[in-house]
Image (cartoon, grey):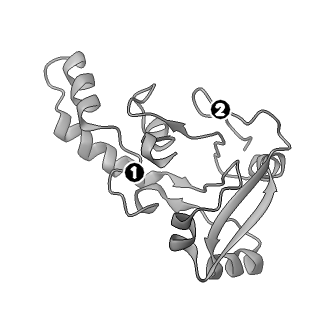
Amino acid sequence: MPLEPYVECLEPETEDAPIWRFMRYDRFCTMMETQRLYFCRSDLFTADDQEGLPPIDYIKEVCAAMGPGHDADYSLQTLKEDRKAFFVLCWNLFQMETAELWETYGPAGVAICSLYSSLKSLLGSSADRTYLGRVWYSMRPKRYNTLHFIATKRPEYV
């Protein structure tokens, strides 16, 4: 299945941009043994239980605009469940070793480098429906859909 850009896909300035992936050493070994990338279910991606969800104020605003019968709490629970159908793999477009990254992945962690074009080519050959694009950092998503919520992160994660 061909690679698909998600809504308002942001790509790097050049497809030959270096990309970095930080991971635990055991995941790296598994990747080398299986020759497969690991995609994490989006609701399990971080310890942050709000990962991949829009702010509740945004949900309330959208539900109010949709009219009677649209409940924000119900919508939030539905979105939490919807995240279980999406799997993510994150790479960085910049080499920025931070203490936070190494606290997460070290002391048994590694950083690997590749090219955006290589990842794009690999994902484009997948039999699964795959999207590729940069994360949008904002408190206000541009669209009301689960894929866009997963691709939008709060500004404090920049």
Where's residue 132, x and y in %? 66, 42
Q: In this picture, is 11 found above or below 82?
A: above
Identified at 58% across, 78% down, the residue is 106
Residue pointed to by mark 1: 51
Question: Where is residue 149, by image quadrant?
Answer: top left
User: Tag 2's secondary structure?
Assistant: loop
Give the crowd class for mark 1: few <14, some 14-19, many >=20 residues within 10 Å: many
At 42% from the left and 42% from the top, the residue drawn is: 154
**Which quarter of the picture shows residue 7?**
top right
Q: CA distance from mark 1 to mark 2?
A: 20 Å
Question: Residue 151 at what x, y percent from top left?
Answer: 51, 41
Image spot of residue 97 (x, y percent): 64, 62
Looking at the figure, which quarter contains the N terminus? top right
Q: What mark, if any, has residue 34 been given in the picture?
A: none
Label 1 element class:
loop
Above or below residue 69? Residue 130 is below
* Residue shown at the point (64%, 66%) measured from the top left: 22
Q: List x then y, in percent, for residue 6.
A: 60, 34
Query: Where residue 10 is drawn, which disc sits there?
Result: 2
| Above/below status of 124 relative to 41 | above
Whether residue 48 sits left or right of residue 26 in the image: it is: left
Residue pushed farthest front?
99
Packing grade of label 2 (10 A; few <14, some 14-19, many >=20) is few
Tell me the amino acid under the disc marked 2: Leu
